[in-house]
Image: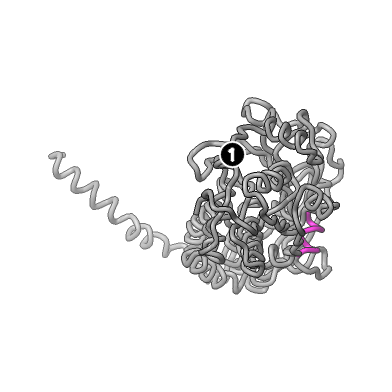
Amino acid sequence: MSTSKTNYKKIVLAYSGGLDTSIIIPWLKETYPGCEVIAVSGDVGQGTELDGLEEKAKKTGASKLYVMDLKKEYVEDFIFPCLKAGADYESYLLGTSHARPCIAKGLAEIAVKEHADAICHGCTGKGNDQVRFELALKAFAPNIPVIAPWRVWDIKSRDEEIDYAEAHNVPLRINRETNYSKDKNLWHLSHEGLDLEDPANEPQYGKEGFLEMGVSPEQAPDKPTYVTIHFEQGVPTMVNGQKMGAVELVDCLNKLGGENGVGLLDLVENRLVGMKSRGVYETPGGAILYHAHRVLETLTLDRDTTHFKAIVAQKFGELVYFGQWFTPLREALSAFVDETQKTVTGDVKLKLYKGNIINAGVTSPYSLYDENIASFGEDGGVYNQNDSAGFINLFGLPIKVKALLDQKRSGK
């Protein structure tokens, strides 16, 4: 639903403390005189970005700030289902995509609790996040109108946003020279804007302060790091033999991956709204987990399930990227994925070296790999190589029949 000239009295704002949402508070107060603005921030692992947020929100006009601790829910209920599915979007590991429905769900719950007249977000009219937020809000607060300032105000650029902030004494942590658009959470960090808007420009991985979750491959250690990850039914539960909770485990792998320059992605992607955009992503722990999970599935899933699951993974990734998390189809695909994961249990050993993730061994009590059958040596009579001739004759029968009929029709 779009905003109107209704004089809203109480507005709940999805608040990050970044440039967009920082100036939205005074803008709302000007646009809807006398309205109360309640700021809501979802903690999905932004870390120090949340420091001083309450003081800043109130200083710029909010009546209060809710900070929802969503880290455990985010990892267990959003990240891990995507990991089990093997879902990505054009190689992007969905770091922003699956955080938005998690945050929006909590945002809607607070809006209902506060009897809000409207919900506001700071997503731009060119981006995917506006869709992700609003589709989730439709699922949990279908009767509350949505205000999207970027679709209605006169501000047209981030420079103009900074002008507005300076004119309204809104404190900022950025300046015009370092004004990358960034999104950070427990799973990833994205970088957009400035020199990255031209795909011809190489990302400045080696520049101090550009990367925040790790180092460039060139700056990584000259010695490899080995890591062993244990999975139970597709869910990672241990690192190097140490049992960990979901949030702790992702943090641990982020550290190991970041130190070894793992998980960098430079991507020109196809946005839902129809344009191409260029982004640089840091997903060190996620890259390790996705790689390890795929390796384990090569051992534990049969051929037909593996191939069909790849189709499901693509559709799953599209649904998440397009903001359709709270839909019957996503839930049905998750049910299928969960069925496939019943045997995805075991240990995967990986070698991390200068941006590379290298297989170093995999074991599972549900392994479908039989060394005797796969061997070039004696297999004990399990596989009769003579059987393959008949198999090929039947498997190739359509090809042979067509060739014979083509010859007959051509008169040869």
Q: Work out whether 21 lies above or below 169.
A: below
Disc 1 marks a residue whose amino acid type is Trp
Q: Work out whether 39 lies above or below 259.
A: below
Instruction: Examine the image and state in which quarter residue 168 appears.
Output: top right
* Residue depicted at x 62% and y 45%: 31
Query: Is 72 positioned to the left or the right of 117 in the image?
Result: right
* Residue depicted at x 14% and y 43%: 409
Q: Nearer the viewer, residue 141 or 284?
A: 141
* Residue depicted at x 57% and y 49%: 130
User: Is residue 121 in the magenta section?
Assistant: no
Disc 1: which residue: 153
Asked if residue 229 shows in the view, the reply is yes
Q: Position of residue 274 (x, y in %)?
A: 48, 40
Segment colored magenta: 247-254
Instruction: Examine the image and state in which quarter residue 151 appears.
Output: top right
Q: Position of residue 41 (x, y in %)?
A: 73, 57
**Can you say which quadrant of the picture contains the C terminus?**
top left
